[in-house]
Each structure stands twice: as structure tokens, then as C-alpha cells.
Image (tube, rainbow, N blue to C red):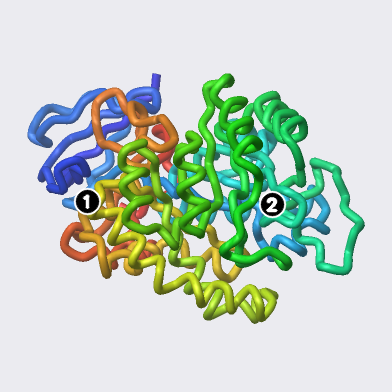
Amino acid sequence: MTLTTLLNANVLDVDNGTIVPDQKIVIEDGIICEISPSTAGVKSGRSIDLSGATLMPGLIDAHVHVTAYTTFGELAQAAPSYASAQAARLMKKMLMRGFTTVRDVGGADFGLSNAVAEGLFEGPRLLFGGKALSQTGGHGDFRAAGVDAYDPSYWQPGLGCIVDGITEVRRAVRHEVRRGANHIKFMGGGGAASPTDRLDSDQFSEEEIAAIVEEAAMANLYVVVHAYATRTIERAARLGVRSIEHGNYLDEPTAALLRERNTFLVPTIVTCQAAIRYGAEAGLSSSSIAKEKALIEPAFRAIELARNAGIPMAYGTDLVGNMMQELQLQEFSIRREVVPSSELLKSATIVGAELVKMENQIGRVANGYFADLIAIKGNPLNDISIMENPEHNLMLVMKGGAIHKNEL
């Protein structure tokens, strides 16, 4: 048995958007087992004085690509061993930013998830979906227009696998289930990074999408979709997809459908801004950067519509490349233009936990929850920008009771 006590903590109650001052948190074998005023007695074991820092749940990024140290086109040509080494480095940096859980939606596999769980390297809890399913010419097909050759090896690093027809999509989902996936991802429409598809295109037939959803449901998994266009979003929600990634062209009728179906939205505006600013240097094509520019303005309107409709929005970033991965916390200040700080903090904690179906384990500072905790200087309810400077403001990072950073 290991026992750790955190003293003098100002605890962020993310449900109510308030701070509960001067609390003591007792952690036993990685689980929070007591929350009480700091004046109460301290049991044996290790104790840490937070000196009034804000203690909050570890952050959840619901849209990452932990293997994406470079563009997806280049990644598909990398050695698996090299991509894994890069992923280990990227994940440690995510943890040091305060993200204790991340959901990978294209590229990560059970090997990386197991490596983190077994402590082979430091990183957030990794929820993976394996390869994203893409139709020929879809957002997971990175062949140039004049190239027909395709390496079908599943273990070649990359974003997705190419499948066509009901039989192939069913088989692909069953393989991901066999490999232990936490969710299933498919490309429902065009994307910015892929070379030959358009942002307004739909991908996969409704029969194929229904087959993907059915196969996932039979394994008690949920489905995630890459979707920008209104029609793409509507088809996915109507056919039972749980999580809409991006959703930039959401409109009012479709927002009402998402609310009716209790479908989650994961906006990722930071990746658009990052690609516009750094994309050329990172190796993105001019056509990809032009697509990103077209996505910015509608993204803010989509967030406003989603918020007004009461759609649950999780925190996601979708960053690719070493340089842009460093911007993971900037989604806070970007969304601040239309979303209050208290709701942003919910997005990165309890909403993310609900999305990944771990709402009784992570996302709150509460008895019986995993001790996934971070301590930060200042009050993020008053100034969300303090979240974006972890080098100076992030004092403590704890995942499952294990301390990964302690500058108290």
C-alpha cells in the first residue's frame, strides 16, 4: 500500500466551476480515498504541501496523433521502431503539459498503449483506435494523384488503412477489436492534409458507415468520425456515430440532431491556426494550407452553435509535427473567444471523461477516482491563459498516484 497526502490545496470543482480552498486529499494505491479540510490530521506516508496552488483533474486531450512527429505522408514511409521512439518523446511532453489521458484517433496501437501502462516510458494514459478507416481516395489515402502503388501492411506507421465495401470495413473493425482498440475511427469526409480529396466530399456509403457502427457496437465500442462538411456530420450522427471530430461546417439543424442523439463534438481549431502559421515549414503542401484557411472562420461559428444547442464539446487538438505538437495547450485561449473558462475546463476534464466512457474514473477530483491530478499556480477560472505556460505554472503532475513532476 502506498499513501500520499496533498495538503493546502485549492481544489477546482469542475462540475460547478468553483474553487474549494484549503483541502487535504489522501491517495491510496493510486485512488483518491479522502477529501477533507487541511486542518484534519495527516496519516503516515508521503505528504506534499501545495501551498495554495490550484489542484485540478489531469487534462484529457480527446484528439491526438501520438505518432505524428512529421506529416502523415512522410510518416507512412518511416520505420516502425523510429516512429515509436518519436511517439515516446511526444507523449512525455504531453504529460509534462498536464495531459494525463489522451485519445489517439489514428496511428497509435496496443504496443504504445501497453508500453505506457507498463511504465516502459512516461506518457499519458493512451486510449487508441488503431488505424483510421479510409476509402480509396479518402482522407486516409495519402497517395498522390499519379501514384497507384499502396503498401497494405498494417504495421507501416501512418494515419489509416484503405478499405472499400461492407465486407472490408467489417473485417477492418473486427481486426481493431481483436487488437484491443478503445474506439473505432473512420474518415467520413475530405480533409486538409490528404492530397486528393475535397473538404466538402462525403466518404463511405451509408451502408458502409452503418456496418462500421454495428461492428463497433457489438464489441461495446463507439465510433469516431472525421467530419467537416454539414452533410458528413449529419450522416454520421444519424447513423449512430458517437463523436464528431472537427465539425467546422456544423449548421443549426444538424446541431439540433447532435443534441437529440447526445453526440459529442471535438473541435480542433488550434491545428488550423498552427498549419497556417507553420505548415509550410513543417512540410505541408500549399493546397493543404489553403484548405486550413477555409476552415478557420466556420470553426468558431460551429462552436457557438454547439454551445447554444447544448452539445457536449470535448477538448481536442489534432496537431501534427514536432513544432506544432508544442501548441497543445493553445486550444484554451483560442476557444476562449466564444466559450467561458469554466466550460473550457469542463471540456478538458469531465466532458472528455464522459466521451471516452471513463466518467466514473477520471475528470474529477473526487473520492474513488484515479489520482490523475495537476497543480497549477493561480486560478484558471479567472485567467485560463495560465494553462498555456506549464514550464512556469504547472507545479505537480500525478497520474494514477505516480508523481511525474513535482516543483512544490
**Image mark for residue 203:** none
* Label 1 secondary element: strand
Query: Mark 1 is on which residue type?
Result: Thr
Q: Quadrant of residue 89?
A: bottom right
Query: Which residue is rendered at x = 41% and y = 62% of the image?
Result: 329
Question: Could you tell whether 237 is left or right of 81 in the image?
Answer: left
Q: Quick check: can you spot residue 396? A: no
Question: Could you tell whether 332 is left or right of 128 in the image?
Answer: left
The residue wearing badge 2 is 159
Looking at the picture, tell me which residue is in the foreground, 256 or 346: 256
Query: Mark 2 is on which residue type?
Result: Leu
The image position of residue 284, as x and y in percent, is 67, 74
Looking at the picture, tell me which residue is in the foreground, 283 or 390: 283
The residue wearing badge 1 is 54
The image position of residue 147, as x and y in percent, is 88, 64
Which numbered disc, 2 or 1, marks the residue closer to the eye?
Answer: 2
Query: Which residue is rendered at x = 50% and y = 45% of the image?
Result: 235
Q: Is residue 288 above or below residue 111?
A: below
* Label 2 secondary element: loop
